[in-house]
Image: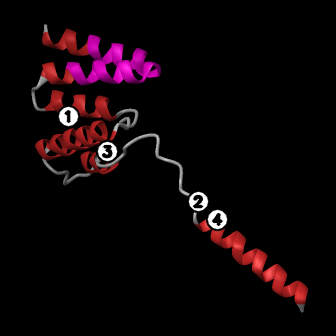
Amino acid sequence: MHTSIKTSGLLLLAALATGCVQAPPQLYQWDAYQPSVYQHYQADSANLGEQIQALEQAADKAQARGVSVPPGMHAHLGMLYYNVGREQDAHAQFAAEKALFPESAHFMNYILKAQKDVSQ
């Protein structure tokens, strides 16, 4: 009897201790990025201006919190800018993606070159 009370007490203490552990902070601020990509590929997608606004707000929120935006967010925002004719902004976003995520450099260089070729 005494052993079962002791065991129950230890189990309760272990449960309380694990319940108090904080989750590790997220590496990236995903916020509106995933829903925006999903909306973009839907047949009845929201207008591009709304998607741009949502991603700009998500980037601002991440910067205010001191967290990074996820890989691909600047590239996606650049693509949206390009689709609405904001080529300078698109170029800046592609360059930001390349700077933040060097593994994307080859693809971003390809996009930047293609963008340059189209605008000539």
Amino acid on which the number 3 mark rests in the picture:
Tyr
Amino acid on which the number 4 mark rests in the picture:
Thr
Q: Which residue is mark 4?
A: 18
Give the residue drawn at x 36%, y 33%. 72
Query: Which comes sooner in the sequence, label 1 or label 4?
Result: 4
Q: Which residue is mark 3?
A: 33
Image coordinates of residue 94 in percent, x first then y, are 28, 22
98 versus 50 height, above or below: above
Taking 21 as reference, is 95 left or right? Answer: left
Q: Nearer the viewer, residue 65 or 38?
A: 65
Residue 95 colored in magenta in the image: yes
Image coordinates of residue 95 in percent, x first then y, are 29, 18
Which range of residues does the magenta coloring cover? Answer: 91-113
Q: Which residue is mark 1?
A: 80
Amino acid on which the number 1 mark rests in the picture:
Leu
Query: Which comes sooner in the sequence, label 4 or label 3?
Result: 4
* Quadrant in the rendering for residue 59: top left
Taking 24 as reference, is 59 left or right? Answer: left
